Amino acid sequence: MSTAFNAEKRSQQEKGRPKGSASGKTGERFVYQDDEVIEKPFNWSQLTRLFSYMKPYTKQLLPLVILMMVLGTVTKLTVPYLTSMAIDKAIAPKDGGSASLTLLYTITAFVLVLYIIQWLASTFRIKFTNIIGQRVIYDLRSDLFKHIQKLSFNFFDKRPAGSVLVRVTNDVNSLQELFTSGVVNLMIDCVQLMGIVVILLVINWKLGLAVIMTVPIMFFISTKLRIRIRRAWQDVRMKNSRINSHLNEAIQGIRVTQAFTQEQENIKFFDKMNMDSRKSWDRASALNQGFGPLIEITGGIGTLILFWLGAYLIQHDQLTVGLLVAFSSYVGSFWEPINRLGQMYNQLLVAMASSERIFEFIDEKPSIDDKPNAVPMPKIEGNIKLENVVFEYEKGRQALKGINLDVKAGQTIALVGHTGSGKSTIINLLSRFYDISGGKLTIDGLDIRDVKLETLRSQIGIVLQDTFIFSGTIRDNIRFGRLDATDEEIEAVAKAVNAHEFIEKLPGGYDTEVEERGNMLSMGQRQLLSFARALLADPRILILDEATASIDTETELKIQDALKVLLKGRTSFIVAHRLSTIRHADKIVVLDHGEIKEEGNHAELMRQQGTYYGLIEAQFKFI
């Protein structure tokens, strides 16, 4: 089934389902909060929380930024007044005296010095704010990633990888401008505005009030756009999140897409999503640009008032030409920060949309976590007991129905059964990827919910059928099982699982760089590396979840020989569909629809001629 078809199916399912709900059916897509516009008022407490990331750097760099800001603003506001002095006293003195070139040159030199100071202050301010901004983004992205690492499996079950990816990349990146320039520009504009208002009123309070009265009109009109702008930018984030999710799914499923020749369907669906994103951006951008013309119109009205009333005041000797020029310059500088403040509000709206999504993840509590009084797990002997264990992935849908199982230390337990019978669920509960819904699960008599997760999982090794190989070298991938392992230990476990031979044949041997997900390796080779990785960790409990499914018969026989030695002294669980691999297990547990139907060794179960016997007969019938 193509990814486009899946996405279309999700769209159809959403229409008849309450927002935020999720169907419990296997394989059906979920409706994510990412896919809905978040309707919330402007949250000042959340904005305060966002800005709290600047706190560690306030003592360090903020005083320098404020100093440069004040210095730049004072020099900028001084220049128009010096210009008025040059006109009224040096070029065309009001008292009718002759022009003074000396005074004009002096004022010009002083203005030049002020411009140099202003440039230096601006340069250092930008440097310091960029340092603060990048450190804040680094801290925010680090906190988000660290928290995601702690979240439980059920969190990822309900969210596509692309949705998680967009939080750590796009949403965090969208805050860069706010922290590198936005916050400081906001302070500069506020200081500049207050300074200009004071100067205007001091020069001529009548003319100052006449010009400033247009500001409330502008803010009243612009307020009407704010809610629409905020919703528009949230919609942009939503559309981009959907594109990222679909893109991730399309790339991961490219083999299936090409195998079923569904490329064109995928392209059509992506084009539709891409077009929706473009239209959404166009709408948000159009609303965003509405602030500019609004400021210009208001500024134009203010300028008309300035020159009409200014000319009247000059005629009545209440204002000089130089002061009118200075007034005009200050008014021009007045509308500039007003315009930037309008843009800043839009920037805050974008930041609010992104921060809502970022803090939604950061505030997500892991469903699997240590209890306040959790104790370290002692060295595991391997006695495991499940007592009337019940588990539900979703309420009302039981995956396990009262499982009772007693495993002695050092035993090898095989779990068999049809797909969906509960084999992998038991493994997930044993590693505490999920918590049981009822009953009790103990290791060496300790309830695993009462011990610290890290100390539990560090003593359990898992080899999955869907092996994940990280980008890096072969050596690094094996060493992932135990980071302090020596090269000799790495080669030893590789030899034990018969991976050494194929590794040595690679161009760089153990230092061969593997591609993303290990695509340069065969499925069997990837599983051998995963096997070596788990064995290097020297776990007290070893879990093989369909670990030999993609290995050829010859390699499997070699692994079986190695396992006789490697599993000695460990409690191990083997989940397998190929029943030939579990004949020598100490106990075989047959599961069906979340219940244990039979248990015993191979010979005992064959004599019973029950469910296990039927599975063996059915499997060998098709060989």
Image (cartoon, rainbow, N blue to C red):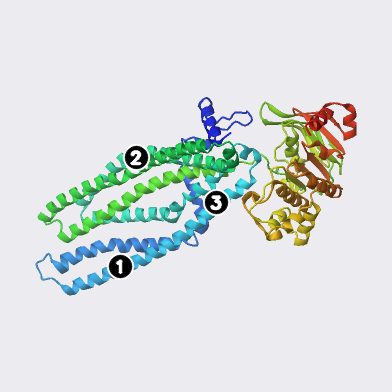
Cβ–Cβ below 8 Å for labels 3 and 2? no
> Could you tell me if residue 446 is visible in this image?
no
Task: Describe residue 313's horizontal placement relative to residue 527 as left or right.
Answer: left
Farthest residue in the top direction?
A: 16
- Along the line of sight, which residue is nearer the eye, 72 or 176? 176
Q: Which mark is residue 141?
A: 3
Q: Residue at x 51, y 52 (%)?
A: 53
Q: Earlier in the sequence, mark 2 or mark 1?
A: 1
Q: Amino acid at mark 1?
A: Leu
Which residue type carries mark 3? Arg
Quarter occupied by the N terminus: top right
Q: Residue under circle 2?
A: 223
Helix, strand or loop under label 3: helix
Where is 567 relative to 393, above or below? below
Q: Is residue 243 visible?
A: yes
Amino acid type of the residue tagged 2 in the rendering:
Thr
Q: Is residue 81 left or right of residue 337?
A: left
Q: In x, y percent, where is residue 498?
A: 79, 52
Which residue is nearer to you in this view: 383 or 70?
383
Q: Secondary structure at mark 2?
A: helix
| Circle 1 crowding by C-alpha within 10 Å: few under 14, some 14–19, many from 20 | some
- Check the image and name the residue furthest to the front: 623
Q: Residues within 10 Å of mark 2 (few under 14, many from 20)?
A: few
Disc 1 target residue = 114
Q: Quadrant of the C terminus?
A: top right
Q: CA distance from mark 1 to mark 3?
A: 40 Å
Residue found 33% across the figure and 60% down from its top = 73
Foreground of the two, 35 or 105: 35
Q: Which sits earlier in the primary sequence, circle 3 or circle 2?
A: 3
Q: CA distance from mark 3 to mark 2?
A: 32 Å
